[in-house]
Image: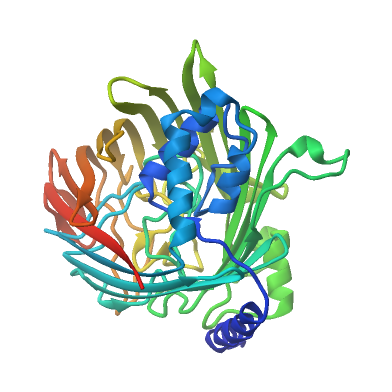
Amino acid sequence: MVDWAKWLKGSAAVALVGWVSGAQAAPWVETGDLRARHHVEALSAMGCFKGLTLTWPLNWSAIAVGMSGMPEECRGSDHAAYLRAAMDQAKGQTRTATLTLGGANQEPLFSHFGSQPMGEADARMAVSYTGRRWAANIEAQYIDNDRDGTEVRADGSYVAGRFGNWQLGVGAIDRWWGPGWHSSLAWSSNARPVAGFWVSRQTPYAPQSRWLNWIGPWDLQMFGGQLEQDRGIPDAKLLGGRLTLRPASFLQIGFTRLFQWGGEGASESWSSLGDAIIGKDNGQTSGFDEGEDPSNQLAGFDFRASFPLFGVPTSFYGQAMGEDEAGYMPSKYATQFGFDFLTHMGKGSQRFFIEGANTVAGDLFGNAREGVMYEHSRYTSGFRYYGRNLASTWESDAKVATLGVQQFFRSGVVFTAALSSATLNVDGGKRAQVHPDGAEILQAVDEQDVILGELRLEHDFLGGRLTWALAATDDPVETFAGESERLTAMAQWRRTFDW
């Protein structure tokens, strides 16, 4: 069996030598930067931004190219002004130290696109360097919660470099694959970031070929990492990729495929990897004995259509992820759809959105299969990392509708409010198995209807950025990790220093 931990360390060392000797990297907008995402999506819906917005983190170089050639009315907008100022600041911060302090009365049960504490105590210190040809961040974290006993972490650390228009990186960074504001069915920041390596395009230029230029700007992300030791199959690998393109000025499309493969007690041969890549892992129909599938697959697509509707910048978006395969295509889909629009009232701008998610496999097409989405007969811990779902914050077998509003003031103050009506763990039960030393999963014990409200305020404070949030449910949510209190109060302060 391949010793992947040693392989990753060796790859990082070789890559670092290459970057120091002549590669190039550019900083990115981190996953969870709600202000930057709002302004990018606003320009896209206004017809001013020609890049891609469906995959985060998003390179600053990609934003710069997407904003190039904007008409005068776009260049003078608050959205363009904010992004230009943020880019200028990023260019000037080549050596920084970032301090983050936060906490909550309990580990937040639900998350969304936006930074928040991961436990009752959350302290982080990061030192980064961004050069002309490479970038690195070393981060130390102390997270205290009652469920995940790994208190000292290096999440957020990375080394990344650029080779031509390709970026190569090693580390553990948050990702968000999909168009949703409150959740993603493919990959989100709900769980801790998975440590691994990635290869991606640096800037999503359109193809020059007359046969291919119709796809417009395109991006490709490929990832390989290793999950935790204390799970159904220890040290299982997470592999996958994502292709996004913009074939029309108003339309973005994304295609995602992720799979768990290998790990302790499972084959890590080239043959089994080949079977996983071609999707030959569907039990006895693929020629395997029960419980011998080489991988656990997820695949699907998403889209965002953005355009001015009656003069109002508007977007329609959706995502579908299949848990299984039929005829070499994904099947048993979980689905998510949404609608948002932008207004400019008073001294700032507002975004209103409605988002619905259904993580009951196959339910949209009348063939509901409870206990299937994000679960697997061999990879018994499911599509999770340290007990939290790698994709949907609502977990498997949930039906949720969310109404949200985001207010962005010119002063930099951000206020958001969201109200969700959810049915959690439809039909009840628990299929996932937890290792005796592993983190318990954050899923409702039985079917439960719950109303969730959240208020969030961000503003400048003591030279940094302070976020306050208050989330409340109408009833306590009884999870397999214990009963969650009705009220979750949290705060987080972050400040960056030059050195």
Q: Quadrant of the N terminus?
A: bottom right
Q: Position of residue 234 (x, y in %)?
A: 45, 79
How many numbered marks appear?
0
Residue at image position (49%, 40%) is: 179
Residue 370 position within the rendered picture, expressed as x and y whole percent measured from the top left: 42, 46
Is residue 317 shown to the viewer in this render? no
Q: Residue at x 59, y 86 (%)?
A: 7
Q: Relative to 333, is 208 on the left or the right?
A: right
Furthest residue toward top: 310
Q: Could you tell whether 77 is left or right of 204 in the image?
A: left
At a point 66% along the width and 73% down the height, the residue shown is 23
The x, y position of residue 56, in whole percent, is 50, 51
Do we see residue 393 in this rendering?
A: yes
Q: Residue at image x 27%, y 55%?
A: 116
Q: On screen, 330 above or below 341?
A: below
Q: Nearer the viewer, residue 316 or 82?
A: 82
Q: Is residue 247 left or right of residue 158?
A: right
Residue sticking out furthest to the right: 210
265 is higher (above) or lower (below) than 69: below
In the image shown, does 115 or 412 lie closer to the viewer?
412
Answer with the quarter of the image where residue 493 lies: bottom left
Which colour assignment does the render follow?
Answer: rainbow
* Quarter of the figure that contains the C terminus: bottom left
